[in-house]
Amino acid sequence: MSQTFAQKALAKKVGRKEVTPGEILTLSPDRVLSHDNSADISEKFSSLGAEKVWDREKIVIVLDHCVPAADSRYATNHTIIRDFVKSQGITNFYDINWGICHQVFSEEGFALPGSLILGADSHTTTYGAFGAFSAGIGRSEMAGIWATGQIWLRVPESIRINIEGSFPPGVYSKDVILYIIGDLRADGALYQSVEFAGEAVRKMGISERMVLCNMAAEMGAKNGVVESDDKTENWLKGKAKGGYEPIYADPDARYARVLSYNISDLNPQVACPHTVDNVRSVEEVEGKSLNQVLIGTCTNGRIDDLQIATRILRGKRVADETRLLVFPASWKIYKEALKRGVIEVLVESGALIMNPGCGPCLGAHEGALAPGEVCLSTANRNFRGRMGCKEAEVYLASPATAAASAVEGRITDPRRFRPQNLTEKSN
Amino acid sequence: MKKIIRGKVFKYGDDVNTDVIFPGKYTYTVKDPKEMAKYALENLDPDFAQKVERGDVIVAGKNFGCGSSREQAATCLVSAGVGAIVAISFSRIFYRNTINQGLPAIVLPELVRVVQGGEKIEIDLDAHRITLRDSNFDFPPFPQFVMGILRDGGLLPHIRRRYV
Ligand code: SF4
């Protein structure tokens, strides 16, 4: 029987040739990820009566959601995690000076083609960009894995999304995925595995593929995946933690749906409050005044994103009434940005450069919004209350749209500035 | 887990997300489930925590629980006394979280369509039947495996009993 990526990836984990969508399997992941929620997970783990974690090498913990700690409660939370890590001898621990979990997990070479990765975070889908099967789970389940090494998963149906055409100037993978989410809606891929394919995806660099897979979560997908290729190989060279074996869907695999999009005429897209699937073309929302612009997060805080922003911000000033906050997604990116002169351009423009981490993305921390304020962010979510205030509004867009909007102090089509083609990007 | 759930209905719409069920700003600081209950649905229905009584049932549209993986979105509802959730569909991680917290999440679009909110409801999990205003609605039984977790009151008690 011909099989999808998801079928093959999960069948391999249970040592079978094939599995069928709908089947429930008990299996053991190759790596698991958790972040600041590891404190709670460790308490749940202890409540099970378990003493030692099942495999200390397979557990990766990154502190990122509220770093450095905003107050003593968060600080205590971090202390609990550090103590647990020490007592369990967990070596893959990344304290507050590394960056956002999904970025660090990738940069450190844990996201490998064909592997099964589970994370106690909904955007664990990101590692599909490396050809991994990766999905989010809850805290109790993570505690269960830490104790037993096992979890149940249902074999998902799959959707194939072919993205064809070439990127018009000022349009990026963020615009593509926002457009697709707007089209399929927030539950368009519920429980399903999404395979991103097609000419445009092949042309994308790893960073851009990460944007697609990261946001697959916003259409309800269990995982999103891009087949690994020589770009993946190159990216992983010198980084990969251990060997790996790529998995590819069979050409005649059965899909619940096959969709095609041509992006050659796509405009920059904006997700409007308060749902990610409330997507408009930028022209329809141009002019909306902004109190804050955020460039960063696990969706769009990488070096290519920062560079795109600097192409617009160079020699310009952020509007007086608007605050621009920039959070590089990791310290590696921060250092690279320093080296390439990106930080200097941003600082000269009036941007605040913040420490790598989730920042205001989930509203727990610095950069929160006041009632009535409006923010445009490069993040992946804009639910009511997301940035710490339920009377605030959050719009989502690409780093180019964010930078252009910061200069004007209102939502602005980035094509009004020097249009840049994606091919100039370096990953 | 009680096998018969009796209470009144709270009705909500589509895409009720985890940021309105349990805001992100509490996720690392509020740890006591009793305290979590106070913030249940804070950004959607600020009076919910005051009004809800043990055994009450949430009935909602499609994609209930979308967004973050935060398990507290399920924990706060259990702790507030919610006996079950019936929806047109659930977001995947939230669905897992409800089961893992011992909270039955039932997919039953036919019921959602006729519910107005406020009426009395009764759910018999073993008979997989819901009674509303003298009408009965059957729902597909949970897989054995899931029923096992629900019966044990959630994943952690389930693992405690079986594995560790
Ligand atoms: S940056 Fe935002 S979406 Fe990404 S892991 Fe952090 S809180 Fe979650």
Image (cartoon, coloured by chain):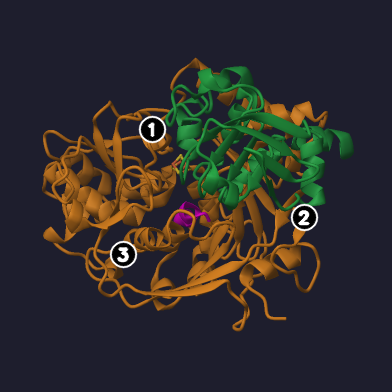
Q: Secondary structure at mark 1?
A: loop
**Picture colour for chain B:** green
Q: Which residue is mark 1?
A: A385
Q: Relative to residue A14, is residue A290 drawn left or right?
A: left
Disc 1 from disc 3: Cα separation: 34 Å
Q: Earlier in the sequence, mark 3 or mark 2?
A: 2
Q: Residue at x 50, y 33 (%)?
A: B21
Quadrant housing residue B4: top right
For the residue carrying disc 1, how many other residues have a C-alpha within 10 Å: few (<14), some (14-19), or many (20+)? many
Q: Residue at the bottom extreme?
A: A252
Disc 1 from disc 2: Cα separation: 36 Å
In-front residue for pair A356/B114: B114
Disc 3 from disc 2: Cα separation: 39 Å
Q: Which chain is depicted orange?
A: A
- Rendered-image quadrant of the C terminus of chain A: bottom left
Q: Residue at x 17, y 57 (%)?
A: A283
In-front residue for pair A137/A61: A137
Region in magenta:
A214-220
Q: Which mark is residue A27?
A: 2
Q: Earlier in the sequence, mark 1 or mark 2?
A: 2
Q: Residue at the front extreme?
A: B134
For badge 1, the amino acid type reads: Gly
Image mark 3: chain: A
For badge 3, the amino acid type reads: Lys
Q: Nearer the viewer, mark 1 or mark 2?
A: 1
Q: Is residue A309 above or below residue A138?
A: below
For the residue carrying disc 2, how many other residues have a C-alpha within 10 Å: few (<14), some (14-19), or many (20+)? some
Q: Secondary structure at mark 3?
A: loop
